[in-house]
Image: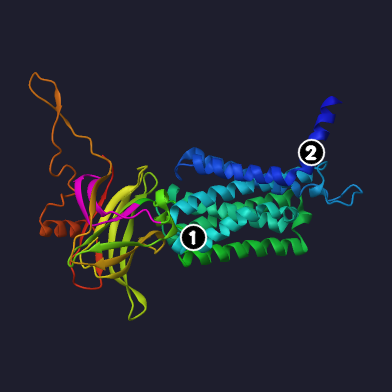
Amino acid sequence: MAAKSILARVRSLYGRFERPVSSLSLVGGFVFEALTLRRVDLFWDNFWVAVHLAIVAVCAVWINLLPDSSNGNTASPETDPHRLHFWLVNVMQFFFGGLLSVYLIFYFRSGSIGTSWPFLLILAAAFIANESLKRHYARLSFQIALLFFAIYLFAIYVVPMLLHRIGTSIFLISGAVSVAAIGAVLVVLARFSPQRLTGRNRTGVFGVIAGVLIVVNGLYFLNVIPPLPLSLKDAGIYHSLVVNGPGYYTVTSEQQSPGLLGPFGFLKRYLGLRQTLHIRPGDSLTVYTAVFSPTDMRTKIVHEWQYYDRAKGEWITRGRILLSVVGGSDGGYRTFSVEPAITAGPWRVDIETLGGQVIGRLKFNVVVQSAEPPLRTDTIGAQPRRPKARSAGGPESASPLPAAAEGNWMSASAGAGRVEAHAMRAGHVTRKDNSAFFINLGHDPA
């Protein structure tokens, strides 16, 4: 009796404070996942997502096996804390909110706000509105739409990791896998509660599935969906870059004022803010990127250099530099490209997949002046481990790093002809003019 009394009291309290408790738990879960989710290819992170999907699917099927009777009460079953409907709807709402928070974090890390904002806005709006949509969770078509959308977003980045490839064909396979998964849920529902999939219910269910397919495919082919599982871990624009070893560089950059963001200046890249660079006539600029790719996935990315032609009112592509990316490194696979024909005005460099999905974008204004701007020198990347040399009968000592330890990188002090020849062997570049270019393919930390 005491246990039943306590349970009844808990039900009553939760029914009274359901909205604030649910909101706090959702926000707390988002913060927790933002701090703990590390890599999109980690087993336990994806297992956590799969468990969420399974729970949402079970609740969606279970709630449709229950009778709709309100036991003479005026309130519908999903609003009555004494009914199982109420708890299934709350569990489904909570775990779907958890899925949205995971997807919002992963896709935000993978894309550029400047190009992916419509998709990210949809995710953010769904996450925020999740709390006010509870009354819709009792509808079968709404449940199926949410579940199918969640499965689709999961398949979009899991299938490429399983097949170790990205591209349009892989995306279409992801869609087929998602349709098969939601089809399996509907088969189970039709087996145990066939009356739920008749008439208007059946039309509504197949309508929302078609709607989700059209929207997601439309966003993909408009290059709005971020190219998960790829993500940009680091990027920068430098006046010069010297290769010290595989993935280890010395760079010179312009000393920028803190600006309005102050210590949060690193957010400029995420927010798509433009910085101003000062160069002398004939100077070049270097774009460095570190792109994360899952373990065992080899792919290619593009650095597309563009400048804004004010006379034509459009962006003109100066060069598209094709670079290789090898997966597995926490800090991303490091690579860079150099543009020597820099002119004054607005510039941007899009870091893209071969299909045109934007992984990141760097925007900057170039001012040409006679005086050299104040520069600072830094090192970026992972310092290579130096091999040990043992002298005869003596202790081990560090030996200098060989001049060409890996064979796929060269010191920036090498002659231009050698660097250019190396670039031609390593990658492919398409240019709109005959100006020279230098590139260096990516370097994983040693």
What residue is shown at x 25% (from left), y 73% (from top)? Answer: 432
Assign a secondary structure to mark 2: helix
What residue is shown at x 63% (from left), y 51% (from top)? Answer: 184
Residue lying farthest left? 392
Residue at label 1? Answer: 172
Work out whether mark 2 precedes mark 1 in sequence or the reverse, and give the earlier one: 2
Give residue 60's mark: none
Chief SS of the magenta region: strand
Are dots 2 and 1 in contact, CB under 8 Å? no
Q: Is residue 147 left or right of residue 343?
A: right
User: Percent from the top left, x then y, of residue 93?
Assistant: 68, 48
Residue lying farthest bottom? 311
Q: Nearer the viewer, mark 2 or mark 1?
A: 2
Place residue 238 in its image quadrant.
Answer: bottom left
User: Percent from the top left, x then y, of residue 366?
Assistant: 28, 66
Place residue 198 in its image quadrant.
Answer: bottom right
**Residue 190 in view in this figure:** yes
Badge 1: residue crowd in 10 Å (few <14, some 14–19, many ≥20): few
> Range of the magenta residues?
235-259
**Screen quadrant of the C terminus:** top left
Does the stretch in magenta take in 242? yes
Q: Is residue 387 left or right of residue 345?
A: left
Instruction: Tell me how far mark 2 sits from mark 1, CA to CA.
Output: 47 Å
Place residue 1 in its image quadrant.
Answer: top right
Residue at label 2? Answer: 13
From the viewer's side, name the closer residue of 347 and 156: 347
User: Percent from the top left, x then y, of residue 83?
Assistant: 82, 43
Query: Which amino acid type is marked by label 1?
Result: Leu
Residue lying farthest top? 393
What residue is shown at x 15% (from left), y 49% (from top)? Answer: 411
Q: Is residue 132 left or right of residue 233?
A: right
User: Percent from the top left, x then y, of residue 279?
Assistant: 22, 63
